[in-house]
Image: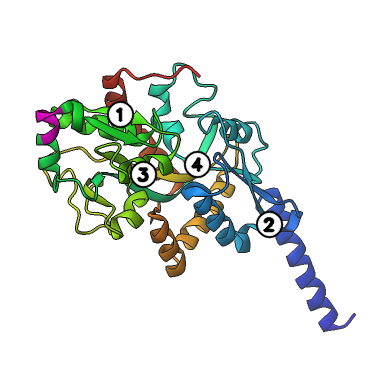
């Protein structure tokens, strides 16, 4: 046997050993030929779906083939339960807003999943905050003027549009009402589009929505954004003050899209996916695309992500409970 043959065989054995070791740890996404299914709880189109598809595109080099599977319905819970019942092998992941883990426990009288235990937080992907806005031709120019108008004539100015009852914008508005001592009443719509159209048309005096939803209408002058809910000014609207700046200390409300895996998924798999997400979110072209959608990349380890979910639950619980709002579906 020649020396070159021995070296060749040694290389082959090392490659085989690496493959076996990777399979044993469940890290052979591409090698198995089995695609990764990214389950998204909303229909195609819209911010969450667009972000999920961008993430899928960015993760394919490290995780192999990724199929985006839209499973809308039951306030995100059809998709959640599908992933909950899936094999914990890293090939089925949930891409969702964090509301099912932070707000829903206080909104729904019954949940068919455990907030902690059924799904593992893998990685946050993007963060986004909310904003309150009025029509572009409204006489109201500032949050102080808005609050004064509500106090003076609540029947006219005390309504605010939200994309859905029981969603984060609904309760962000409720938090502002409590902090400012004003009587606000949410007007629920079936999605952001109709809420925005009624705001622009002057059919509602104000709207609380995801900040990114206001971006194109603000640029065209159709809406005026009065304040945002982040801890600091948004890089997407740096000229708009936060509620904290305006004197409402502690009123910091934000949301995230993130990845979750079935309980029992190995730490090795969770950490590998997390690392892939972190790498993808640092790319300048990805950050630019996310900014166009109204989102900012989020970065955290799985344990940090889990801790942030617990912290968010602590923030939203008193806000939701103070409204007395519940859903039974």
Direction from residue 125 to residue 232 in the image, left or right: left
Between label 1 and label 3, give the one nearer the viewer: 3
Residue contact between numbered discs 1 and 2, judged by CB atoms under 8 Å: no
Residue 247 spot, x, y in % from top left: 10, 41
* Category of crowding for the residue at label 2, using alpha-carbon neighbours closer than 10 angstroms: few (below 14), some (14–19), many (at least 20): some
Specify the quadrant of the image occupied by residue 168. top left
Mark sitting on residue 138: none
Mark sitting on residue 65: 2
Cα–Cα span, label 4 and label 3: 23 Å
Residue at 56 percent across and 32 percent down: it is 73
* Residue assigned mark 3: 196
For numbered disc 3, what is the local secondary structure? helix
* Residue assigned mark 4: 96
The magenta span reads: 149-153
* Category of crowding for the residue at label 4, using alpha-carbon neighbours closer than 10 angstroms: few (below 14), some (14–19), many (at least 20): many
Between label 1 and label 2, give the one nearer the viewer: 1
* Residue assigned mark 1: 186
């Amino acid at each position: 046997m020649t020396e070159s043959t021995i070296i060749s065989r040694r290389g082959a054995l090392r490659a085989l050993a690496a493959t076996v070791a990777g399979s044993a740890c469940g890290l052979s996404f591409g090698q198995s030929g089995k695609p990764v299914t990214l389950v998204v709880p909303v229909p195609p189109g819209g911010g969450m779906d667009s972000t999920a598809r961008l993430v899928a595109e960015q993760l394919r080099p490290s995780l192999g083939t990724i199929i985006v599977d839209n499973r809308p319905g039951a306030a995100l819970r059809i998709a959640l339960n599908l992933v909950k019942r899936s094999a914990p092998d890293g090939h089925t992941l949930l891409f969702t807003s964090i509301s099912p883990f932070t707000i829903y426990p206080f909104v729904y009288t019954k949940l068919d999943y455990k907030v902690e235990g059924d799904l593992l937080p893998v990685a946050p992907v993007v963060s986004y905050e909310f904003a309150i806005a009025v029509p572009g031709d409204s006489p109201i120019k500032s949050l102080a003027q808005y609050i004064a108008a509500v106090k003076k004539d609540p029947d006219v100015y005390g309504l605010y549009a939200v994309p859905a009852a029981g969603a984060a914008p609904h309760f962000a508005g409720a938090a502002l009402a409590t902090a400012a001592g004003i009587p606000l009443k949410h007007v629920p719509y079936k999605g952001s589009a109709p809420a925005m159209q009624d705001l622009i048309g002057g059919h509602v005096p104000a709207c609380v929505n995801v900040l990114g939803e206001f971006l194109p209408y603000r640029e065209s002058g159709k809406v005026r954004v009065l304040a945002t809910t982040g801890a600091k000014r948004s890089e997407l609207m740096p000229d708009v003050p936060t509620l904290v700046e305006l004197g409402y200390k502690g009123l910091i409300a934000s949301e995230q899209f993130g990845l979750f895996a079935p309980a029992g998924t190995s730490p090795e798999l969770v950490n590998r996916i997390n690392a892939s997400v972190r790498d993808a979110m640092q790319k300048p072209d990805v950050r630019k695309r996310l900014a166009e959608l109204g989102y900012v990349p989020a970065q955290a380890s799985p344990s940090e992500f889990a801790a942030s979910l617990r912290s968010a639950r602590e923030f939203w619980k008193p806000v939701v409970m103070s409204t007395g709002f519940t859903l039974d579906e």
